[in-house]
Amino acid sequence: MAKIELYSGFLCGYCLAAKRLLNRKGTDSEDIKVGFHPERRAKMAERADGRHSLPQIFIDGNHIGSCDELHALDAAGNLILRQKIADHEVTAQMNVPKLSFKTGNTGGHRPERCLFRLAGGQ
């Protein structure tokens, strides 16, 4: 099983996005909060070659980078995470339907808001 460490901060949108991607992949990650712990942030920066931005992600001790790098790996098809489930190793994969965007009057209080629809009219 891959060991995933995610250094994160309080109310960090990029940290939440990285966690959501990892959750969709079916993996568990160790969330290391650095907000009120300068010693943890110093250790993170040391491991991440001086980078202080959040999140910083490590998989099996290898520095992946931030949320952007994690999503870029996934988009390129290079983010393959293995997790043991009931003594069987499986590869987490994610199939995402294409979304189309439509704006218009929805009949609600906000007449112009974006509606998300699956491609193909679903």
Image (cartoon, rainbow, N blue to C red):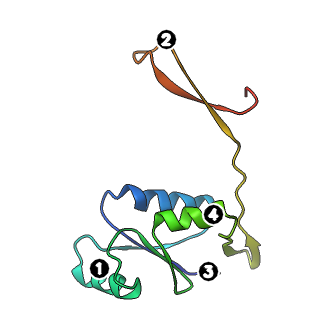
Local SS, label 4:
helix
Q: Earlier in the sequence, mark 4 or mark 2?
A: 4
Instruction: Judge left or right: residue 21 versus residue 36.
Output: right
Q: 28 above or below 115?
A: below
Q: Where is residue 62 in the image (x, y as percent from the top left)?
A: 53, 85
**Which is more foreground, mark 3 or mark 1?**
1
Calculate the distance from the C-alpha at mark 3 to the C-alpha at mark 4.
16 Å
Instruction: Judge left or right: residue 22 versus residue 81.
Output: left
Calculate the distance from the C-alpha at mark 2 to the C-alpha at mark 3.
47 Å
Q: Which of marks 3 and 1 is nearer the N terminus?
A: 3
Q: Which residue is drawn at 30% across and 82% down?
A: 40
Q: Position of residue 97 (x, y in %)?
A: 71, 43
Q: Earlier in the sequence, mark 3 or mark 4?
A: 3
Local SS, label 1:
helix
Q: Residue 107 carries which label?
A: 2
Q: Residue 115 carries which label?
A: none
Type of amino acid under label 4: Asp
Q: Which residue is drawn at 61% across and 67% down?
A: 73
Is any part of residue 22 visible from this angle? no
Kindly identify which residue carries mark 4. Answer: 74
Do the residues bearing badges 4 and 1 touch, measured as CB atoms within 8 Å? no
Mark 4 burial class by Cα count in 10 Å: few <14, some 14-19, many 20+: some
Is any part of residue 43 visible from this angle? yes
Q: Which mark is residue 41?
A: 1
Q: Earlier in the sequence, mark 2 or mark 3?
A: 3
Calculate the distance from the C-alpha at mark 4 to the C-alpha at mark 1.
26 Å
Type of amino acid under label 3: Ala
Kindly identify which residue carries mark 3. Answer: 2
| Image quarter hosting the N terminus | bottom right
